[in-house]
Image (tube, rainbow, N blue to C red):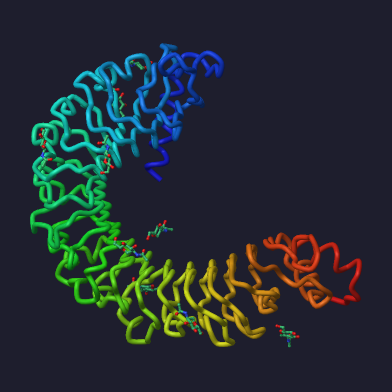
Amino acid sequence: MFKIFLLLLMTALSAAQTARPFDRDHDCPAQTIGGKVHECRCEPNIIECHGRGITTFPHFARTGYVFQSIDLDTNGLTTIPALAFNDINVTDIILSNNEIDTIDDRAFVSLERQLRFLDLRQNNLTHLPDFFDKFVNLSIFDVSYNPIAPENFTENVMRELGDYVTEFRFGDPSLTGWPTNLHHLPRLEILKFYGGTMERIPITAFSGFEWPLRKLWIQNTNLISTPIALQDLKSINEFHFDNNPSVGDAGILIPAFAGLSGTLETLSLENNSLTTFPSVLLTLHNIHNLSLARNNLQFVSDEAVAVVNSNLTILNLQACNLDRIPGALSRLRHLEYLDFSYNNITSIEKNDLQLMHNLRTLIVSYNPLQYISNSTFYDLTSLRRLILQETGLFSVPEAIVKLPNLQTIDLRDKESDIECNCDLGWLYCFTKRSTGLNILGDCYTIVMTIQDYAENQIPKTCPIIC
Ligand SMILES: *[C@@H]1O[C@H](CO)[C@@H](O)[C@H](O)[C@H]1NC(C)=O
Ligand SMILES: *[C@@H]1O[C@H](CO)[C@@H](O)[C@H](O)[C@H]1NC(C)=O
Ligand SMILES: *[C@@H]1O[C@H](CO)[C@@H](O)[C@H](O)[C@H]1NC(C)=O
Ligand SMILES: *[C@@H]1O[C@H](CO)[C@@H](O)[C@H](O)[C@H]1NC(C)=O
Ligand SMILES: *[C@@H]1O[C@H](CO)[C@@H](O)[C@H](O)[C@H]1NC(C)=O
Ligand SMILES: *[C@@H]1O[C@H](CO)[C@@H](O)[C@H](O)[C@H]1NC(C)=O
Ligand SMILES: *[C@@H]1O[C@H](CO)[C@@H](O)[C@H](O)[C@H]1NC(C)=O
Ligand SMILES: *[C@@H]1O[C@H](CO)[C@@H](O)[C@H](O)[C@H]1NC(C)=O
Ligand SMILES: *[C@@H]1O[C@H](CO)[C@@H](O)[C@H](O)[C@H]1NC(C)=O
C-alpha cells in the first residue's frame, strides 16, 4: 500500500518536474551510433534500447526532457565510455545482459548524484569500481551474475553506498565466498543472493542489517542447509529459498527459523530436493503463502500436512510429481489459492477437494486430465476461477454446475479442443443462470469459442429445456 503510494507520489513529482508534455518527435534523444540512425524508442518515461544489437555506446542528443529510465538491456556493450550519459536526464539506468567489463571513471558523471536504480545484472565486471562511491542517491543496486570475487565488493564503495542502498542483488555461479562488505549496508530492506559455489554462508552473513531486512532471496546455490544466520533477522516477512538442490529434507534446519516464527508470512522452498512438507512449518504461525513447487513430493500424507500450523491461504504445489489430488489438503480450511500445475494428475474424483469452502482459485493446468467426476466440486462454494489449461480434456466438466460463484473457467489448450455438440445443453442453461461467466477455450468440431457455442449456437440448433 505504502509502496504504491510512494510510486504515485514519485510519478506525480517527476511529472511536475517535467515542464512540458512529452513530444514524441523532438524529445527522443537517441539518435546515432557511428553516424547510423539506431532504433531506440521513447515513451514519456523511458528511452528503450532493449535488444537492438548495440555494441558501441549510443550517442544521445540533448533534448532537456526528463525521463525516468534508459533501458539498454540485452545488447553487446563491453565498455561504458566517459560522459556516456551527459546529454540525458534519468534516474534509472538498465545495462543488464551485456558484456560490460570496463566502465570509465567519468561514465556517469552528470547523473551520479541523482541515480536511484543501477542494473548491471549479467555483465563481465570483476570488481565494483571505486568511483561507484559517488552514487549518493542510489537505492536499488544490481550486480548479480557478474564474476566479482568476494573481496572485490570494494569496501569504500559499499561503505559509501550504505547510507542509500535499500535493495542489493548479487551472486554468480563463480562466487566462492560471502562478501563480508555487505555489513556496510545498514539500510538494506531487500537482499537477493543469486548463487555461488559455497556450501555454507557465515553465521554473521546478515549482520549490519538484521533489523531493516524484510525480504530475502537465496537462490541457485550449493548450500546444504538453510543458513543459521537467518535466526538474527528481526523483521523478515518474505523468504525465497529456491533452487538449492543440495538441501533436502534434512537441510531445512528448525533453529535457523527460530527468530522468524512471528514475522514470516511468505515462504518459498522450491526445488530443494524435498520429499515432504518440512516440519519447521509447525513453528511458523504467520505463514499464509507457501510454495513447495518443483520438489519431488509424489504424494502428500495427513502427517505431512499436519505440520502446517498456520492459516495458509496460498499453496503452490506445481511440478511436485503428484499423480492425484492429495486428500490431506482438506485440513487446510483457509486455502484460497491452490496450484497443482505441471503434475501428473489424471483425474479429479468425487471426494477430492472436500471442505475447501474458502478456495477461490484452483489451477490444475498442464496435467494429463482424463476424467473429472460429475459429482466433485460440491464444497467449493467460493470458487471464482477454475484454470484447466493444457489438460487434454475433450469435454467441459459438468461438475462446474456445482460452483455457485464461478466467474472464469479456462480450458485453453493448444493441442486439443473441446467437443462442442448438443451434449453441452447443460452449459447453455448454466450460462443463463451464471451471468458474467467467462469461458475460455475453443471448440474442436466447429470454428467457434466454447462460450459462443454455448450461448448462441446451442439455442439455435439443440432441443433444450432449462
Ligand atoms: C534532471 O532534471 C531535474 C528536474 O528538472 C533537474 O533537477 C536535474 O538537475 C536534471 N539533471 C541533469 C543531470 O540534468
Ligand atoms: C534522491 O532520491 C529521492 C527519492 O528517492 C528524491 O526525492 C531526491 O530528489 C533525489 N535527489 C536528487 C539529488 O536527485
Ligand atoms: C563475458 O563473459 C562471457 C561469459 O563468461 C564470455 O563468454 C564473454 O566472452 C565475455 N565477454 C568479454 C567481452 O570479455
Ligand atoms: C579484483 O579487482 C581487481 C581490480 O580492482 C582486479 O585486478 C582483480 O583481478 C580482481 N580479482 C579477481 C579475483 O577477479
Ligand atoms: C533446480 O535447481 C537447479 C540448481 O539451481 C537447476 O539446475 C535445475 O534446473 C532446477 N530444476 C528445476 C526443475 O527447476
Ligand atoms: C505468494 O508467493 C509467491 C512466491 O512464492 C509470489 O510470487 C506471489 O505473488 C505471492 N502471492 C501473494 C498473493 O502474495
Ligand atoms: C486460524 O484462524 C482461526 C480462526 O479463523 C483462529 O482461531 C486461529 O488462531 C488461526 N490460527 C493461526 C495459527 O493463526
Ligand atoms: C504419470 O502417470 C502415468 C500413469 O498414471 C505413468 O505411466 C507415468 O509414468 C507418470 N509420469 C510421470 C512423469 O511420473
Ligand atoms: C456425467 O458426465 C458424463 C460425461 O462426462 C455425461 O455423459 C453424463 O451424462 C453425466 N451424468 C450425469 C448424471 O450428469
The x, y position of residue 429, in whole percent, is 80, 72
User: 183 or 58: which is nearer to us?
Assistant: 58
* Number of numbered discs visible in the structure rendering: 0
Q: Is residue 459 left or right of residue 436?
A: right
Above or below, 274 against 113 in this view is below
Residue 232 point in image, percent of width and height? 13, 58
**Point 25% across, 40% down: residue:** 143
Q: Position of residue 236 (x, y in %)?
A: 24, 56
Left or right of residue 210: residue 263: right
Q: Quadrant of the C terminus?
A: bottom right
Residue at 13%, 44% in the rendered image: 149
Left/right placement of residue 299 relative to residue 455 reads left
| Front position in the image: 93 or 146 | 146
Q: Nearer the viewer, residue 376 or 108?
A: 108
Q: Is residue 102 above or below residue 195?
A: above
Q: Residue at x 18, y 24 (%)?
A: 134
Going by the image, does 171 lie left or right of 301?
left
Q: Quadrant of residue 303?
A: bottom left
Give whichever of 332, 185 is nearer the camera. Answer: 185
Q: Is residue 409 visible?
A: no
x and y percentages locating residue 461 in the rendered image: 91, 69
Residue 459, image quadrant: bottom right
Query: Is residue 337 in view from this perspective?
Result: yes
